[in-house]
Image: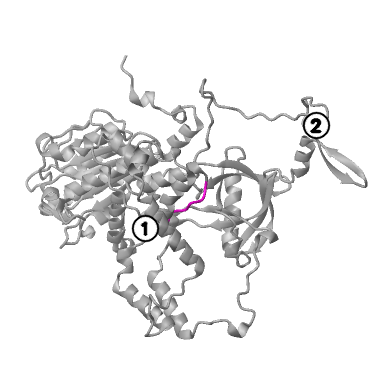
C-alpha cells in the first residue's frame, strides 16, 4: 500500500477532533488567484531589480509562488486554487471557454499548498504557451466573455465553507484596465452589465474581490474605466486605490523574506479583576533571548542520560541520612527548625495569578521602568466564557482615559508588580501592523533603580549644549528617524536563513534563496546628501572648523589595552586554520583561551561557557 506523505507527516494538531484543528478550520482562508493570460500580459514588461525586463505574467506568477511558499510556513490550513483566463484551452468543471484551472479543475475542493504543488507551479511559464496557450477572450463580434466565465468558475470553487467562519477571496491580476474596450455599442453595455452582476452575486455570497493591477512604466492603470464599479470604489477610496494596490503587490513579493511563525501561547493565566470576577488570558513572548541548549551527559557504555543524586551523611556516625537536613533560625536562644516543605510554603507569596490593584495615568510610567522584554496578553474564552467581552471593555476604557493598570503577578519565588498597557490595533494598506491587546511590563523594585551618578559636583562646570548645537542635533535626528517604526517590519535574518534551507530542501532547489538582512545599517540611506549634510553641520557646530577627527580623540588607557589585546589576538589567531578545525569538529578539543583568540580578533563577545564560545564561532563562520 502506497503511503500518503500528508498522512505520514501530519501533526497531532491536524486531527479533526483536536481543538487547534477546529480553530484553524474556523479561521482559515479560501483564495482563488485569477490571472489574466492575454497576449498583453506577455508583451508588456517592467524593469526588475537586476535591470532585466520582466513580463507582467511573470510578475503575477512569481507573486503567487512566493505567497504559496509563505502559506506553507505561516498559514498551512488555508486552501487555494489558481485560475487563468483569456486562455486558448479550457479546463474547468463548468466547461466554460477561455478559463483554465491549474490545480483543481476536476473537483470542487481547493488545495492546501504543498511542496509538490509549488514545484509544478514554478514551471508553469515554461510550458504555458504549449499546454494552455494565450488569446484574447473578449473580441468584437463574439459573445464570449472570459472575465465573466472566470468569475463564475471562481465562485464555484469557493462554495466550500461558510462565509461566517472562513474568509473567501478572489485576487485578480491583470494589466487591462478596460476589458471591453475593443467592443462598442449595445454589446459592450450588455457584457459589462452581466459581468458586474456576476461580481455582485459573488460578493453577496461573502466573497471579496481584490484587484492587483499591473501598470506599464509609462502608463497608469485607470481603475475608473471598469474595475472601480466592480469592486465598489468611489470617492477617497478610489483616489487612494492605486498606491494601496501597489503596496499589496510589493507585500506579496516580499512576503517570502518576511515569513513569520504565528505567535504561540506561552501560558494561560487568570486575571482577577475583583472579588468573584476573573477572566482568562493567553500570554505571548514577543521577544525572547536565544540561548544554547542544555548539555545532556551520557553514560559512555549504555549511552543513557546520567542523573545526579545527592546524599547526606551524618558527620558523627557516618550513617546515610534518610531524610534531608532541616534548616533552623535562631530565635530567643532557641533554634527553630524548618523542613524543606515549610520553607517552600513560607516563600509562596504569589499564587501565579494576575491580580488587579488599580490604575494610574500613563505619564507615571517611565521608560526605565521596563526591566526586561514585556509579555503580550490577549483574552481567551476557552475556560472562562465572556473573558473577551470584559477584556475589550477594559481595553477601550484604558485607551480612552490614557491609563495603565497596576497588577500583582509572578511565580512563588519571584513575585512582581506589573503594568498593563493597552495597545490599539494598527492597520495599514498591507494588513495588520500591530494587534490589539495589552503589554505586561515588569516594574522594578526600589533596589532595582540605580541612582544617577553625578560626574560633576559643581553644577557650574557641567558642560551644556548651546541652542545651535541642540538645533543641529534635532535636525540630524529628524533626518535619520524611522517613520512609523515597528519591530514587525524587520524579519529575523537567522529565521529567514533557516526557512530558506527548508525551502531549498523541500523543493529540491540547487541554490538557496538569497536572504536580505534588514537589521544591518542602511549605508545607502546614510549616504544620502541630506543626511550627510546634517551630520557635517552637527560636527561643525560641536567641534568647530579646525576639528581633527584623528588627533583630537582622547583614547583612554583601557581602550589602548583593549586595542593591543585585539591586535595580539589577531596575530595569534592567524596561526590556526579555523575553517578546517570547524569542518573536522576539533573546536571542542581546543582550550577556552584559544577559542577566545578567534572571538577577540573578530570583535565578538568572549563571555559564556565553552559550548557557547564554540557556537558563537560557528555562527560567525556561517557553519
> Closer to the camera, 568 or 545?
568
Can you name the residue that lies furthest to the left here? 141
Height in image: 397 above or below 130?
below
Residue 235: tell me if it is visible: no
Which percent across, then down, holds residue 415?
69, 49
Q: Please provide percent x and percent y for residue 46.
A: 16, 56
Asked whether residue 533 is drawn in magenta, I would say: no
Q: Earlier in the sequence, mark 1 or mark 2?
A: 2
The residue at 24%/43% (across/down) is: 34
**618 and 143: which one is in front?**
618
Secondary structure mostly seen in magenta is loop
Residue 45 in view, yes or no: yes
Question: Looking at this rendering, what residue extends furthest in the right direction?
Answer: 333
Label 1: element kind = loop
In the rendering, which numbered label is found on residue 520? 1
Tell me the SS state at disc 2. Answer: loop
Segment colored magenta: 603-608
Mark 1 Cα shell of 10 Å, populated few (<14), some (14-19), many (≥20): few
Q: CA distance from mark 1 to mark 2?
A: 61 Å
Q: Position of residue 555 (x, y in %)?
A: 46, 71
Please tell me which residue is depicted at 58% across the width and 48% down the height of the picture.
Answer: 389
Mark 2 Cα-neighbour bin, 10 Å: few <14, some 14–19, many ≥20 = few
Residue identified by numbered label 2: 315
Position of 333 with respect to 325 (left or right) is: right
Which of the two marks, 1 or 2, is nearer to us in this view? 2
Left or right: 456 as drawn, with respect to 42: right
Q: State the image coordinates of residue 388 (x, y, percent, origin top left).
A: 57, 46
Q: Is residue 397 left or right of residue 190?
A: right
Q: Is residue 223 above or below residue 550?
A: above
Amino acid at each position: 500500500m502506497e503511503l500518503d506523505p500528508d498522512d505520514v507527516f501530519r501533526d497531532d494538531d491536524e486531527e479533526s477532533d483536536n481543538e487547534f484543528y477546529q480553530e484553524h478550520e474556523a479561521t482559515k482562508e479560501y483564495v482563488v488567484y485569477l490571472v489574466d493570460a492575454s497576449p498583453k500580459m506577455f508583451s508588456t514588461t517592467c524593469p526588475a531589480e537586476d535591470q532585466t525586463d520582466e513580463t507582467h505574467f511573470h510578475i503575477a506568477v512569481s507573486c503567487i509562488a512566493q505567497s504559496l511558499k509563505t502559506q506553507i510556513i505561516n498559514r498551512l490550513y488555508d486552501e487555494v486554487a489558481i485560475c487563468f483566463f483569456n486562455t486558448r484551452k479550457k479546463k474547468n468543471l463548468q466547461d466554460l471557454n477561455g478559463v483554465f484551472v491549474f490545480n483543481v479543475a476536476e473537483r470542487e475542493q481547493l488545495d492546501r499548498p504543498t511542496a509538490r504543488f509549488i514545484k509544478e507551479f514554478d514551471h508553469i511559464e515554461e510550458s504555458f504557451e504549449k499546454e494552455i496557450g494565450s488569446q484574447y477572450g473578449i473580441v468584437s463580434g463574439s459573445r464570449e466573455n472570459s472575465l465573466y466565465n472566470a468569475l463564475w468558475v471562481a465562485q464555484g470553487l469557493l462554495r466550500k465553507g461558510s462565509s461566517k467562519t472562513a474568509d473567501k477571496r478572489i485576487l485578480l491580476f491583470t494589466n487591462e484596465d478596460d476589458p471591453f474596450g475593443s467592443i462598442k455599442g449595445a454589446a459592450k453595455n450588455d457584457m459589462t452589465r452581466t459581468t458586474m452582476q456576476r461580481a455582485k452575486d459573488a460578493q453577496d455570497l461573502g466573497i471579496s474581490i481584490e484587484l492587483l493591477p499591473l501598470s506599464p512604466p509609462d502608463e497608469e492603470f485607470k481603475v475608473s474605466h471598469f474595475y472601480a464599479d466592480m469592486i465598489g470604489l468611489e470617492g477617497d477610496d478610489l483616489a487612494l486605490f492605486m498606491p494601496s494596490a501597489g503596496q499589496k503587490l510589493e507585500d506579496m513579493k516580499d512576503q517570502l523574506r518576511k515569513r513569520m511563525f504565528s505567535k504561540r501561547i506561552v501560558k494561560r493565566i487568570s486575571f482577577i479583576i475583583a472579588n468573584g470576577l476573573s477572566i482568562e488570558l493567553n500570554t505571548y513572548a514577543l521577544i525572547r533571548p536565544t540561548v544554547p541548549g542544555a548539555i545532556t551527559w551520557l553514560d559512555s557504555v549504555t549511552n543513557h542520560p546520567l542523573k545526579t543524586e545527592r546524599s547526606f551523611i551524618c558527620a558523627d556516625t557516618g550513617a546515610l541520612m534518610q531524610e534531608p537536613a532541616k534548616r533552623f533560625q535562631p530565635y530567643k536562644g532557641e533554634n527553630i527548625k524548618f523542613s524543606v516543605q515549610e520553607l517552600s510554603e513560607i516563600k509562596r507569596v504569589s499564587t501565579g495569578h494576575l491580580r488587579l490593584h488599580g490604575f494610574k495615568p500613563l505619564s507615571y510610567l517611565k521608560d526605565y521602568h521596563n526591566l526586561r522584554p514585556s509579555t503580550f496578553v490577549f483574552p481567551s474564552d476557552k475556560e472562562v466564557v465572556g473573558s473577551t467581552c470584559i477584556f475589550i471593555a477594559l481595553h477601550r476604557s484604558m485607551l480612552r482615559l490614557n491609563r495603565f493598570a497596576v497588577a500583582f503577578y509572578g511565580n512563588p519565588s519571584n513575585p512582581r508588580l506589573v503594568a498593563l498597557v493597552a495597545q490599539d490595533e494598527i492597520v495599514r494598506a498591507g494588513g495588520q501592523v500591530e494587534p490589539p491587546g495589552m503589554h505586561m511590563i515588569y516594574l522594578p523594585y526600589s533596589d532595582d533603580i540605580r541612582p544617577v551618578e553625578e560626574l560633576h559636583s559643581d553644577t557650574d562646570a557641567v558642560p551644556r549644549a548651546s541652542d545651535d548645537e541642540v538645533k543641529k542635533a534635532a535636525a540630524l535626528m529628524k533626518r535619520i528617524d524611522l517613520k512609523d517604526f515597528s519591530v514587525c517590519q524587520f524579519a529575523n535574518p537567522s529565521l529567514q536563513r533557516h526557512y530558506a534551507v527548508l525551502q531549498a530542501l523541500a523543493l529540491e532547489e540547487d541554490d538557496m534563496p538569497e536572504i536580505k538582512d534588514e537589521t544591518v545599517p542602511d549605508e545607502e540611506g546614510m549616504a544620502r546628501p541630506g543626511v550627510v549634510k546634517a551630520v557635517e553641520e552637527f560636527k561643525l557646530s560641536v567641534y568647530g572648523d579646525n576639528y581633527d577627527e584623528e588627533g583630537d580623540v582622547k583614547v583612554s588607557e583601557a581602550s589602548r589595552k583593549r586595542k593591543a589585546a585585539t591586535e595580539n589576538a589577531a596575530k595569534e589567531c592567524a596561526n590556526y586554520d579555523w575553517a578546517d578545525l570547524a569542518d573536522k569538529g576539533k573546536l571542542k578539543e581546543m582550550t577556552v583561551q584559544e577559542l577566545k583568540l578567534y572571538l577577540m580578533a573578530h570583535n565578538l563577545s568572549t563571555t559564556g561557557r565553552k559550548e557557547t564560545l564554540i557556537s558563537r564561532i560557528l555562527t560567525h563562520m556561517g557553519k
